[in-house]
Image (spheres, rainbow, N blue to C red):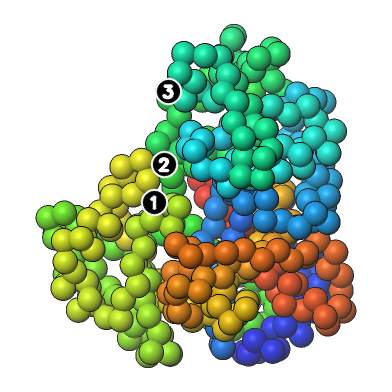
Amino acid sequence: MIATKAEFEELVTKNWNELNAWIDERMSEVPVPIYSSVDIRESKTKFAPVDHNMYPAGFNNVCALDQDACSLAFKSALDRLAPDSKNIAILPESNTKNSFYLDHLAILGKILRDAGFNVSFISFDETIFDGKDSLNLISFSKFDVEIVKAKIVDGLIHGSSGPLDAVILNNDQSKPIDLQWDSIKTPVMPTPKIGWFKRHKVRHFRFYKEVVDSFAAKFDIDPNLLMADFTCVDGVDFGTKDGLDKLAAAVDKVKDRIENKNAKIFVKGSQGTYGMGIMVVDSGEDILTMNRKERNKMDIGKNSIKFTTLLVQEGVETIIKYDEMPAEVTIYLVDGKGLGGFMRANGERDSQANLNSRGMIFKKYCISEIRENQDHKCKEAVYSVIARLATLAAGHEIKEVL
């Protein structure tokens, strides 16, 4: 059995084609999201995805070579999912004051234009337009981004130039977009039925465990090499303190199960996004002694989502560093293929902390040209396989809601 990181790295390097063929076959059975991103931690003993984003917001951090690979993958996916499409739109978040997010939109638009599509940005959120039909914005890197008011005509989504052939959703819907999606004929990808108003981290990691168990059985791998231990707690109210005893007990239970007794435990709002609703603890006692400020931070997330279901997850201490700062890896995928990536580093945090927080910086690296038997690309190949397994799990999430 493959029981160490070094053995798994060798397996991936020497059997890249076979491993990916196995993933491809299973991806053909589920509606894999058209794009996604996966945060991966590497410790001394394992590789583990710690978050999966169905509506990624960092294509500006993907290197230029990988952006070209993303264009080709988007072209292939859209030709299959929305044949003969020419005019497509990106439906973004309403947080238009985030200039780095606008950089991401500009680059995502360029990637799709380079694939041969006419690309626009649309929104159904009347509050951002101030009575006008369009909103003109400038990103951090001085890209122009125009968002136009969208409308529905005879079941088709229209932009400023008429009906659209397809829409790429880049809004995580922690606040659901108020539309009758079942009556809309325009293809929307990923499905709007899987936003954070519906989605749960707990469900994702349960599907991921099923995927990894199957993958590990096929290739004789210890599945613990590829995932963090976790459990779920329902019925928690940080405001009233109801359920905190259950949550504390769950923290101690996960801590007891894991081999590294010095590891931290991450407690995450199951519907949390934007790095919100996360705390890092040593034991259940830290839950029971939370002060009001700490409980308030864990109570409510983006767009006033109240966190009552919690993911309790083994903390994976990162061994990755960039300029002596602790770092973790994020892999970007298009049509289920790992095509871009970067490191997220944070000099204000330590190797066991949540790095997706104030002080983080990004370092691009290219991964789209990995081939079999490339020892120098070993780590990137491993991260790509892990990210693909996590995205296969996301496909099972989507299948469940359709």
Residue 327 percent location from the top left of the image: 57, 74
Q: Amino acid at mark 3?
A: Thr
224 w.r.t. 80: above or below: below
Residue 47 placement, left or right of 245: right
Characterize the local packing of mark 3: few (<14), some (14-19) or many (20 or more) Cα atoms within 10 angstroms.
Answer: few
The image quadrant that residue 110 belongs to is: top right
Q: Residue 271, labelled with which disc?
A: 1
Question: Dot 3 corresponds to which residue?
Answer: 127
Instruction: Tell me the amino acid under the disc marked 1.
Output: Gln
Residue wearing tag 2: 174
Q: Find residue 279 and report its image quarter.
A: bottom left
Q: Nearer the viewer, mark 3 or mark 2?
A: 3
3D distance between C-alphas at marks 3 and 2: 17 Å
Label 1, label 2: how far apart the Cα atoms are: 8 Å
In the displayed structure, 398 sits above or below 327; it is: above
Closer-to-camera residue (316/77)? 316
Position of 383 with respect to 123 (left or right) is right
